[in-house]
Image (cartoon, grey):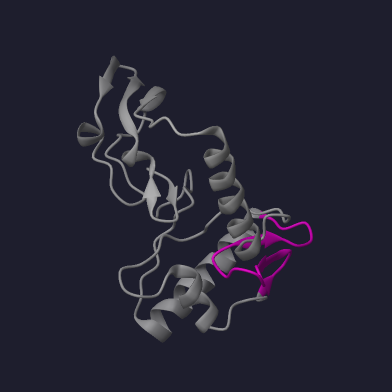
Amino acid sequence: MNAGAYGSDWSDILERALVVSEAGSGWLTPAELGLSYRHSELAPGQVVARVEFRLEPRPVEQIKADVAELVARRKATQPTNKRTFGSVFKNPPGELGAGQVLERCGLKGHRIGGAVVSPRHANFIENADGATSADCLALMAEARRRAREQFGVELEHEVVLWGLAP
């Protein structure tokens, strides 16, 4: 998926990845992996088994300070103390991120069954009270419908749904 946050992602530091499939294994570069925003060209059945990163040496205190700042930033804006499965939708093209689109659709706190759109960040679904997969999928469908109707934005799942069409 080439996950990332705050302006950088894995492709920024990836040297190469060992990709394994039924056909065998081999090392691929970031270009060969086709990495872009929340995307890779890995085919179904291919698994990344090992990676090598290009890291820059920095003083330990600087690393600790950077990590502390990122953790504080995340805790201030995301429901880190709730049960979620992370960001639900990829950010669409344009000025507004997925969370901002959903917030402007009035979805913060919207609930279906035990699943609720996080009051802290609208691009997270919290398990508020025994949420089922069906509750989460229904909430995701409602969010996509409202984003499309109110903003003309087609939100794409960031969460990978196995066994379901996208």
Whether 120 is among the magenta residues is yes
Q: Say which of 48 and 3 sits in front.
A: 3
The residue range painted magenta reads 111-132
Q: Quadrant of the N terminus?
A: top left
Which secondary structure is most common in the magenta stretch?
loop
Q: Is residue 128 visible?
A: yes
Residue at point 46%, 47% (across, down):
160
Depicted 123 relative to depicted 61: above or below: below
Residue at point 48%, 43% (across, down):
162
Across and down, in percent, residue 40 comes to 30, 41
Across and down, in percent, residue 149 comes to 41, 83
Left or right: 146, with 13 as reference point: right
Left or right: 12, with 84 as reference point: left
Across and down, in percent, residue 10 comes to 38, 40
Across and down, in percent, residue 83 comes to 70, 53
Q: Quadrant of the C terminus?
A: bottom left
